[in-house]
Amino acid sequence: MSDSKRPQRPAYWLAGFLASAGVMHFVRPKQYDALVPKELPGERRQWTYASGAVELGVAAAIALPKTRRLGGFAAALLFVGVFPGNVKMALDYERTKKPLQVRAAAWFRLTAQWPLVKWALAVRDNA
């Protein structure tokens, strides 16, 4: 398939996924605050808003063909970067004996990070 005919639907889905997640950082910040390690300087809410803004920026970069390659790479880095927060959440939920459904969802998030990295790199490679 020629470069101009490569399907870009995965890029648009990834951009939508990241944009939705970014918006949720502003709509429901409390759930994201809990992911921020207390060892980071500053207020957790600042980190929540900053990471939401980054997700929105990466989504925009993926949505635009001229910046899609860079956006795909940035998304992969973002997914790797948030992994420690997801580990923290899963461990916190285990320690506090959250309901089984909630704990299972937290552990699922961990397993989903690596397919997300792969998806982001595929978007980069097909840009």
Image: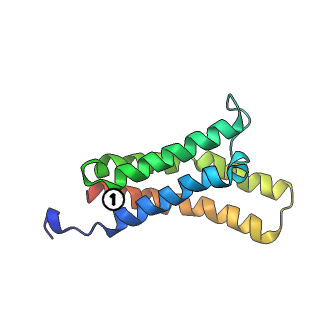
- Where's the C terminus, which quadrant? bottom left
For disc 1, the neighbor class at 10 Å (few under 14, some 14 to 19, many from 20) is many
- The answer to whether one can see residue 81 in this image is no
Task: In the displayed orientation, state which residue is furthest to the front.
Answer: 27
Coloured how? rainbow
User: Looking at the rendering, which quadrant does residue 126 occupy?
Assistant: bottom left
Query: Between 69 and 19, which is closer to the camera in this rendering?
Result: 19
Task: In the displayed orientation, state which residue is furthest to the top.
Answer: 41
Type of the residue with mark 1: Val
Left/right placement of residue 67 relative to residue 108 reads left
Query: Between 18 and 3, which is closer to the camera in this rendering?
Result: 18
Please say if 66 is above or below 114.
above
Q: Residue at x 57, y 47 (%)?
A: 82
Q: Position of residue 84 (x, y in %)?
A: 62, 46
- Where's the N terminus, which quadrant? bottom left
How many marks the image carries: the answer is 1
Task: In the displayed orientation, state which residue is furthest to the left.
Answer: 2
- The answer to whether one can see residue 69 in this image is yes
Q: Residue at x 34, y 60 (%)?
A: 122
Left/right placement of residue 99 relative to residue 60 reads right
Q: Position of residue 98 (x, y in %)?
A: 83, 62
Name the secondary structure under disc 1. Answer: helix
Q: Residue at x 74, y 36 (%)?
A: 38
Q: Position of residue 19 (x, y in %)?
A: 48, 56
Q: Return the residue at label 1.
A: 123
Query: Between 51 and 28, which is closer to the camera in this rendering?
Result: 28
Query: Between 31 and 114, which is closer to the camera in this rendering?
Result: 31
Q: Residue at x 45, y 62 (%)?
A: 16
Q: Position of residue 85 (x, y in %)?
A: 65, 47
